[in-house]
Image: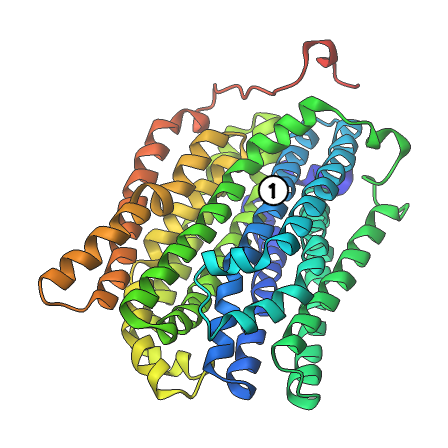
Amino acid sequence: MDKIQELETKPIGHLLWQYALPAVITQVVASIYNIVDRVFLGQYVGALAIAGLAITLPIMNIIHALGSLVGVGASSRMSIVLGRKDVRWAEKILGNSLLMTFFFGFLFVTGGYLFMDRILEMFGASADTIAYARQYMQIVLPGMFFTTLTFNLTGLIRASGYPTKSMWIMAGGAILNIFLDALFISVLGLGIAGAAWATTLSMVATAVVAVAHFLSPKSFIRFHRHIWAPKLYIFRNILLIGLSPFLMNFAASFVVALLNRQLIRYGGDLAVGTYGIVNTYGAFLVMFILGLCQGMQPIAGYNYGAGHSHRLRHVYTLTMKVSLVVGILGTVLALAVPRLILRAFTDSEALLDLGVPAMRYLNVMMPLIAFTITNSQFFQSIDKPWIAITTSLSRQVLFLIPLMFVIPALMVRGGSDGLTGVWVTCTVCDVLGALLAAALLWSQRKVFRPDYVPPLRRPRKEAGPKE
């Protein structure tokens, strides 16, 4: 327990650096999977291949959402119960989270194969892009089960006191993915199928290494026979916290499907490809912020469970400051050198011309996006699931879905460009989402008070210190 107990003794700044740096690297590395695929496809295959890959992103995000549903919920709960010094309960969380991962993974992969074409068409695939999207998904879909398994286990590795090891597992997979992309696409000429095989094999390799950690006797949280007994209250607690990132990712997938349809309507297939590239830059910044928040999560969760409100306030404030700096830097780059960023993905002048205004509109409010994300992640870390859900879904569901139909149509009626209206809608919703996040933060300010006592959901019959 020495490694985990340092969460209540070491200075917060040192801890946030210790936990956030590996988590940031993990998130940035995870985003490399799709970025590398786009770079190689853009340079060696063409614009339609990028558009086909962009069609698959919402589907992959839904599968990632399943990983978040279990992984984030399990790691947040583990941090809180370790703050109560209950190792046996933490081990039960490990076993029950794996049972949930196996169930959801099998369900989604099977459904993906049965309804693949219908799903791709729903997410905006056209006659020109569906062949690329189908070829990619047929190969990568089984590997997505290993992705959800890896996300779950690396989160638990980090929550149990091994942030650096969690980072190296993900980094190794990304390095392998880059090597295999170069081999399969540029050397062997396998096209989008090569990108899919590179991603799939990398996912399998990372999952194997993550499982090995919990088989090692060096880990104080590891596989035991007793952890596999299903516990409904553990399922419930994991799901309650995991609902926030799950619904956020799930909603994001349908929002992307809506965006793709609007983009095809106002700009055609190239507009979809443009959004895929621009969204990659934004996703890279968001991954950086999420990594920082994942570093905050075990510190906030542990000290919340232990009742150290002053340390909870400190880690929140420090995380928010760094997130805002990242958001500001991301906005400055997007506004100053958008064409330079876009050229990393494509040499197509058509995509570059469409991408420059999109890059500016979609990233001008990145500091506000950082503010919203940090608040959502903080509340899921301290077992405030409904506040986290409301914060994370406000931009995408409450604002973006209705306004995506209203603003472009109004701009077209006013004689402006409907495609620009799509980009403007995203900017407006970033502002509205941040305003709601600020209101919700104010409503929950009691968690920072010295006299606040956090509740802990557990059956009365198991209310003792040990099960």
Amino acid carrying label 1: it is Val
Which residue is pictured at 61% across the width and 37% down the height? 73
**Label 1 belongs to which residue?**
72
Where does the N terminus fall, quadrant-wise? top right
Q: Nearer the viewer, residue 394 or 222?
A: 394
| Vertical order, 459 against 61 (above or below) | above
Question: Which image quadrant is residue 143 in?
Answer: bottom right
Instruction: Judge whether residue 317 can be spotted in this image.
Output: no
Q: Foreground: 184 or 356?
A: 184
Residue 42 in the image: x percent, y percent?
50, 82
Image coords of residue 246 (percent x, y): 54, 43
Against 414, is 376 above or below?
A: above
In the shown orientation, is residue 455 left or right of residue 463? left
x, y percent for residue 194: 67, 78
Mark 1, other Cα within 10 Å: few <14 / some 14–19 / many ≥20: many
Residue drawn at x 57%, y 82% as measured from the top left: 40
Q: Is residue 155 above or below residue 137?
A: above
Task: State the residue lying farthest toward the top.
Answer: 461
Q: Is residue 398 visible?
A: yes
Say which of 164 and 39 sits in front. 39
Residue found at x 74% / y 56%: 165
Q: Is residue 395 left or right of residue 37?
A: left
